[in-house]
Amino acid sequence: MNAPIKKIHFIGICGTAMGSVAAMLKDQGFTVSGSDERVYPPMSTFLQDKGIQIMEGYRPENLAVTKPDLVVIGNAISRGNPELESVLNERYYYLSLPETLKQFFLRFSRNLVVSGTHGKTTTTSLLAWIFQDAAFNPSYMIGGIPLNLGQGCAHNTRGKHWILEGDEYDTAFFDKRSKFLHYLPELLIINNIEFDHADIYRNLDEIKLTFKRLVDIVPQNGMIVLNADNSAAIGVTRHSKSQLLEVGFSENAAIRITDVSADEKGTHFNLSGHRFCVPMYGNHNVHNTAMCITAAHCYGISYEQIAKSLSGFKGVKRRQEVRAEINGITIVDDFGHHPTALSETIYALRQRYPKRKLWALFEPRSNTTRRAVFQHELPAALAKADAVYMTQIARAEQLAENDRLNVEQVIADIKKKNVPAWYEANSDDIIAKLPSQLAPGDVVAVFSNGSFNGLIDKLITKLSRK
């Protein structure tokens, strides 16, 4: 067990995070290899350009060829995988991806971890950009593609600071704790806490418990920046030994957000006696930004420098991302899938595009929205748009019928609110009807945590021909 690790093999290497960490370890001088059943560009090309050997398919022979000192097992790998079974049978030393990050990188750095049900990716991207723009040279791990940073979702600079998106989802088949419990936070941001991930959590109390465990590992000389407007976030930090900074709109907030307004440049607001503007919209993004300002200032970055960084922030792919403007019709791509995120984003688009007709196209694809968990919350959120399209739930055959979201009922409930709404079987059926309904000035917001079967590209093509 004390033998030096020289060769590292990744099972499931073509996942975005797995491939990024594999590349970082290769840059550290390790011999790195990996296997996957989905070997295709751009990740396969990226890894091959790094000199990493990739084997297609999961087979015990992959281990016999590479003879690794350590095997990193991806979150998508489960028992029955033939290569994993060989790892267990042959007693290879193995770790999860979060454990690998902890052992090889995070033990030696000052770590800022961004957590919460919503807004993690945007908040982490913005915080990393503020640190980079202030010449802090941060490393980062982000569950999306930040448009400012140019290095994909993960990058190791060997600087003092790591900025990580802290996911509450489980770690690996052998470790059902949340990923963020491996990240050794010195500063922790808790944006908000709501029920999600219905495939692994039974209720909100179970989610609160994992956040309490996260709070428990923040050191006494560390700091927690939390949402003063979210009772669950306040509750899980009640017995913290760390310093707490509550940020929000509430009059009880230690650091209060006030005087919010929006124009074509973005959203303006006051915080800690300073005026800021961020080129994003919606109160949730104001809150995310205020958390970043507070955290960055704790590390000595001046408010003036932070304001400069905010003005240059370009956002994150698939977060209110404008994909096209064709014949006066604007198409927006958004990752939103939770009712709260849908509601907040629709409100933000109202601010960004006042007096324009807003269409919401939603694919119930996440492990939570496929279920009946949000049967009543989804109509309330989507009805804030001017018109709605929905498709059938993804992977319906995996759920018992009484556990599935009833999409037809969601549509019926939206119509009861006098909002036009349609249920279509798939994206092709939407494309057959929607273009003829659109007019110059309309905004089409496409919500999915997947590809929506290429709906946006299909819509762009159809409108361009029209």
Image (cartoon, rainbow, N blue to C red):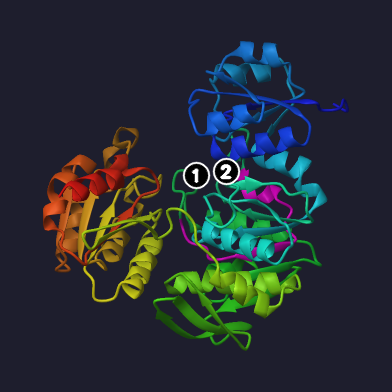
- Give the amino acid at mark 1: Ile
Q: Residue 125: horizontal and vertical position, in percent? A: 57, 58
Q: In the current view of this chain or complex, which residue is farthest to the right?
A: 2
What range of the chain is rendered magenta? Answer: 177-195
Give the foreground label among 2 and 1.
2
Task: Please give the count of numbered marks on the rendered protein.
Answer: 2
Q: Secondary structure at mark 1?
A: loop
Q: Residue 364: horizontal and vertical position, in percent? A: 32, 48
Position of 465 compared to 394: left or right? left
**Which sits in the foreground, 279 or 239?**
279
- Residue 170, numbered circle: 2
**Which sits in the foreground, 357 or 51?**
51
Labels 2 & 1 near each other (Cβ < 8 A) = yes
Which residue is found at the position 16% from the left and 52% from the top?
434
Q: Residues within 10 Å of mark 1 (few under 14, many from 20)?
A: some
- Whether residue 14 appears in this view of the structure is no
- Give the amino acid at mark 2: Asp
Which numbered disc, 2 or 1, marks the residue that appears first in the sequence? 2
- Residue 406, numbered circle: none
Q: Residue 327: horizontal and vertical position, in percent? A: 21, 59
| Cα distance in 3D space between marks 2 and 1 | 8 Å
Q: Is residue 190 magenta?
A: yes
Quadrant position of the N terminus in the picture: top right
Position of 419 compared to 398: left or right? left
Identify whether 71 is placed above or below 381: above
Q: Secondary structure at mark 2?
A: strand
Q: Is residue 200 magenta?
A: no
Position of 449 compared to 243: left or right? left
**Which sits in the foreground, 319 or 459?**
459
- Residue 200, numbered circle: 1
Would you identify the image quadrant in which residue 396 lies? Answer: top left
